[in-house]
Image: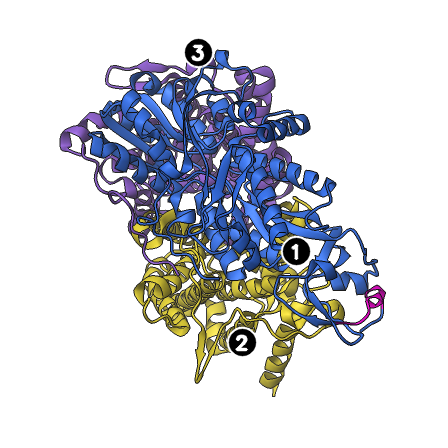
Amino acid sequence: MAEGPLGDLPGFRPELGGNRFDPNNAIFVLDPIRDKEIPVNVRLKPTRGQFIVGGLAASAAVKFASINVIAAPKTLVVGLNVPQTGPYSDQGQDQLRAYRLAIAEINAKGGVMGMQIEESVGDDQTKAPVAVENARRMIERDGAVMITGGSSTGTAIAVSGLCQEKKTIFMATLTHGDETTDLNCHYHTFRRYNNAHMSAQALAKTLLAKYGTGRWFHITADYAWGHSVFDNLTSVVEPKGAKTIANVLMPLGTTDFSSALSQAQAAKPDVLVITEFGKDMVNALNQSAQFGLTKSAKILVPLADEYMAKGAGDNFDNVVTTAPFYYKYQSDKYPEAKRFVDAFVKKYNSPPSNGAECAYVDMYQWKGGIERAGSLDPKAFIEKMEGFHFTATKGPEYWRAWDHQGINTVMVLEGVPVAGRDDPFAFAKVLEVHDGDAVAIQQSTSKCKIEDS
Amino acid sequence: MKALRFYALTALGLALFPFAIHPIGGYGGLATQILIAGIASIGFNLLLGYAGLLSYGQAMFYGVGGYVALLTVSRFFPQFPNFWLAIALAVAFVTLMAFVIGTLVVRLYGIYFALLTLAFAQMFFFIVFKWRDLTQGDDGLQGIASPPLALGPWSIDLTTSFPAFDLGPFGNLSDLHYWYAFVAIVMLAVLGFMRSLVSSQFGEILTAIRENEERSALVGFDPRRYKLAAFVIAGTLAGLSGALRGLYETSIAPDALTVETSGNFVIYTVIGGVKTLFGPLVGTGLVMYLQNVISAKTDAWRLIEGILFVAVIVFLPGGVLGTFSRKGARTVLARAVRVRPESVP
Amino acid sequence: MQGPAPLRGRPPFALPEDSTIDAILSQLPGQLLDGFVRGLVYVAIALGLTIVFGMLRLVNFAHGAFYAIGAYVGLVVAERYGLAAGLIVAPLAVALFAVVFDRVLLRFFYDKEPTAQILVTFGVALVVQESLRLYFGGTTRSFPIPAALSVPVNLGFTQYPAYRLAFAVGIVAIVLLVWLFIQYTSYGLIVRAGIRDRTMVQLLGGNVALASTIVFALGAGLAGLVGAAASPIYSVDPDTGFSFLVPSFVVVVIGGLGSFWGAVIGGLIVGELQSLTTLVLPAASDVVIYVAMALVLLVRPSGLLGESEVIRG
C-alpha cells in the first residue's frame, strides 16, 4: 500500500475516527470531481511503515488520476449551508458573503491553528430535507468539521438533528424560533442570533405604549418560527388586554397574501402583525399597502433585516420591528463592529444585514473555540464554548451553557421613510436596546434538555 | 440454478456498488440513499412499465410511509422503540391506503388516471402539511433517532461503520455504515420478488391487459383486479422506501409528498428503463449521482437531468438499460408501432 | 428523540374569537371578490390547457412552463421598456416557443398513447424550468406594480388593489376575445369541428394540422400573457410553472377537459371554493379543491361541461 505519493509519509498506522481528524497528520489531496483540495479524513497514529486512507474520494484521486498530494497548506473544511434560492435567499446570500469575508480574513492571518479554512457550500433552498442532505454530504464526503448556516428555524432544527447524530459542530446563524435552543436544542448546536422569546419580551413596552391593547390580526408564517413568534407575542400582549382576532397561517414561500389581507380588511384590526420573513414579508407588507391596510392599521413586523426593509421601501415607515444588530448603530459604538462593517462594505459595496453579522461572528467564535480547545474534538470545543464570555461587534455577550443560546442585546427599531435614509439599507431608528439576560428564556421555563455528548 | 446465479451476481453487484462509485465522487451515504429510493422506483416500474399506468402520486405512499415509521418511533410507541415495528406499521398502513385508493383509481385510464393519482397525492400533502399537531407541519419530524435493529439476540446500531479496511482507489470499507448492508439485503429481496413476479403469470397478464384490455377481459381476467394488485404492490414498495428513508435520515418533511417527488420517481424509472428489472435502480442511481456529485461541478445538473429525460423519451423509449437489451428493443418496437385506438378511423 | 411539541399559548387552529356568523358575513364580499380574481387567473391559464386538449387530445404538462416563460420574458422586457411592452412581447415570445416545440417535438407524439404524451411534455417542462433557473437564478423576482395602480380602490364593501382590478378586467376581455375567435372565425370553425371529431375534419379536407398549431400557439400565448401580467402580483421563480400547472389541472378536470366554458366555470369554482373555505375552515382551503377534483373524476370524469366520450383518452 505504500506506493505512490502517499507512501512518503513514514510510520503511520490508521485509526479511523469517523469524521474527526488530527490536523497535524492530515493529508491533503486534490479532488478531481470538485477540482479543489480536500483533507483526507483520518486520524493517523505512528506505528509500522504503513497507512490506510479513510474517507473520501481523495485516495482514489491520488491513485487513479495520479494527482499529487499537496503537503501544505493544510486545510479545514467547513460547511456553509444557506438558502441561495427561494424566499429567504437575500438573507442566505448575505450570510454567505459574511462567512467568506471571515474565512478570507482568518486564512490571511494564518488560519485556524495553522490550517486554512476551506468552504463547502450548499444551497438549502429553505427546505429542511435539502438542508439535511447538504449537511450530510458536507460531513460524509467533504469531511466538514463544522456546519454553519441558517435563515429558517425549520432548516436549523433539521440540520441540528443531523449534526447531533454525526457528532459535528453546528453553528446555527439566522434562526429566530425558540425551538433551536429550546425544545429542539442539541449538544452540538450553538445559536447566537436572538430568539422569538427575546424579541417579544423586548417589544413588550413599546407595543403597549405605541400599539395599545386593541384588536390584533396576525398573519403568520406556517412553520416553527412563525408559530414561535405568535405564541411569544400573544403571551406578552394578551395578558395586558390585547385581543387576538385572527391568526392566518401562510406557508413559507407564499407570494400572494390577498386572501389573508381581504380577511384582515373586513376584520378592521387596530394592529396587523406580519410574522413573515425575507421576500414573503416584503410581499405581505407591500400588498397590505395595496389593500389600504398600512393606513387603517398599525403594522408590526416582529423580525426584519436590511434587505426586507429595503424591499418594502416607504411601506416600512413607522413599522416597529426587532433585530439583533443594525450596522448603523453598532458601528458607531463598537470598534470591532466598525471594522467589520467597513471591511464588508469595502468588499461587497453594501452594508451587512443582521444575519451577515451573526454569520461573521459565528465563524470567529468557532475559530476561537477550536483554538482554546487546541483540538478539533467537538467535546473539547463545546466545553470551551459553554459559558464563554466575549466582546465582539455588540458589547459584552456570552454563550449560555445549558441551552447553547448566545446571550446578547436585542434592539427595538422603528422604520423610517425612504427619504430619511442615508442609504437604501439605513432603514430604522433605534428605540430601545435590551440586555440579553433580561429578556431570554429562563432555565425554569425552558424545554431544553441538552444531551451529555 | 438460474435463480442462484441471479442472486449471487446481484448480491455481488450490490456489495461492490458503493466502492465502484467511489472513484467518481460517490460516497457511502449516497449509495445508501440510491438503494432506498430505488425500492420505490422498482415498484413504480411495475405500474408504469408493466401495467402501463402512469401514476403522479407515488409520493403519497413514499411520504406517508416515512411519517408512519417515524411517528411509530416518536409518538405511537415511544416507550417501545422498535425498528421492525416502525417498518411493519408503515408498510401495513401504506398497503391499506394503496388498496383503498387503488380500488378507486384503477377504474380510470391514461390522463384521467394520472390526474386522479395526482389529486390524491395533493390531498395527502395538504393533510400532512396542515395537521401540525401530529406531523409538525412544514417543519416535519426532525432528529428522531432510528431504534437499533433487533435481530434475534443481537441489537445492531445501523449507524455503526464497518471496520477499517483500505480498498485503494475504491475508498475504505469504513466509509460504509451497517445501514448500507441492511438496505442492500432489502434491495436484493425486492429485486428477487420483482423478478419472479414479472416472469410469473401475473406479469404476463398485466402486460396483456396493457396491450389490449378488452381482449384480456374477454378471455376471463378481470383487468381491474390485476391493475389493483400492481397499484398496491407499487404503493407498498414506495411506502417501504419512505419508511427506510425516514429512519435513515432520522427526519421527514412534507417535501416528501410533493408533486416534485412523484415526478422524481417517474424520471428515475423512465431514464433507467421501464420494463426492465434493474432499469429503475440504474435510473435512480444516475439521477441521484447527478444531483449529489455533478451538482458540485455545475449548476446545470438539473438541466442535464431534464435533457436526459427528454432524450430518453424521444430516442430511447426503453430507457438507458432497456435499449441495450434484446427484450428492451422489442419494447421500443412495440411502442413505436402502437397507436391509439381512437385515431384509427 | 422528539416528543409531541406542546405549543405555548393557544393551539394554532383554534377558531378566531371573531368567527361568529356576523364576522364571516362581514368578510364574505371581500373574500368573494378575491376568489373571483384568483379564479380568473386559473381561467386564463386553464383555457389554453383545455382548448389544446380539445383539439389534440393531449394534456400538456408543459403548459405551466409557458406561464413561467411569459412571466420571465415579461419581466425582462418590462424592466427595460415598461409593463405594456412586456405584455405585448411575452405572449408572442411564448407562442413562438410553443410553435417550435410543437413542430420539432410534440407532433411526433400526437398519435402516441397518452402516457407518452404526458412524459414528453413533462420532460420539456423540466428542461424549460431548469433553463430558466440556470439563466435567471433561483431567486424570486417580480416586476413592481406601476405607481398609479398600486393604490387601493374603494369599492364600498371593500378596498381592493387597483392593479388586481385592472388585471381582472383584462382577463375577462381576453376570455371574450378568445371565445369570439373560436366562435366566429374560420379557424375557430375548424377548431370546434376538430374538438367534435378530428378524423372527420381531416377526411373533409380541413387543415387540421395548421389549426392545431394555431390553437397550440394561442393557448401558450394566453398562458404567457397571464404570466407577464401576473408577475407583479404573484412574483415568479423557476418553479412557478408547476405551481400554477397543478391547480389548472383541477380547473380543467372540474370544468371538463376540452370544454371552453368548462374551464371558465371550473376556474371560478376553484377560486371561490378556496376563498369560501378560507372563511369557515382555513386549514382545509387547499385540500378542498383536490377533494373536489377527485370527486369529479370518480363520479363524472368528463367534468361538469365535458363530453363523456373522452373518458378513455
Q: Nearer the viewer, residue A437 or A255?
A: A437
Question: Which chain is assigned purple?
Answer: C
According to the rendering, which colour does chain A have?
A: blue
Asked whether the beta carbons under mark 2 and mark 3 sit within 8 Å of each other, the answer is: no
Circle 2 crowding by C-alpha within 10 Å: few under 14, some 14–19, many from 20 = some
The percent coordinates of residue A69 (x first, y second) are: 81, 58
The residue under label 3 is C148
User: What's drawn in magenta, residue-wise?
Assistant: A4-12
Give the letter of the yellow chain.
B
Position above or below: C212 against C161:
below
Q: Secondary structure beneath disc 2?
A: helix
| Chain for numbered disc 1 | A
CA gap between label 1 and label 2 equals 28 Å
Q: Kindly tell me whether residue A402 is visible in this rendering.
A: yes
Task: Assess disc 1: are there few (<14), some (14-19) or many (≥20) residues with their C-alpha within 10 Å of its C-alpha.
Answer: many
Residue beneath disc 2? B185
Q: Which of marks 3 and 1 is in front?
A: 1
Residue A192 appears in the picture as rendered: no
- Chain under numbered label 2: B
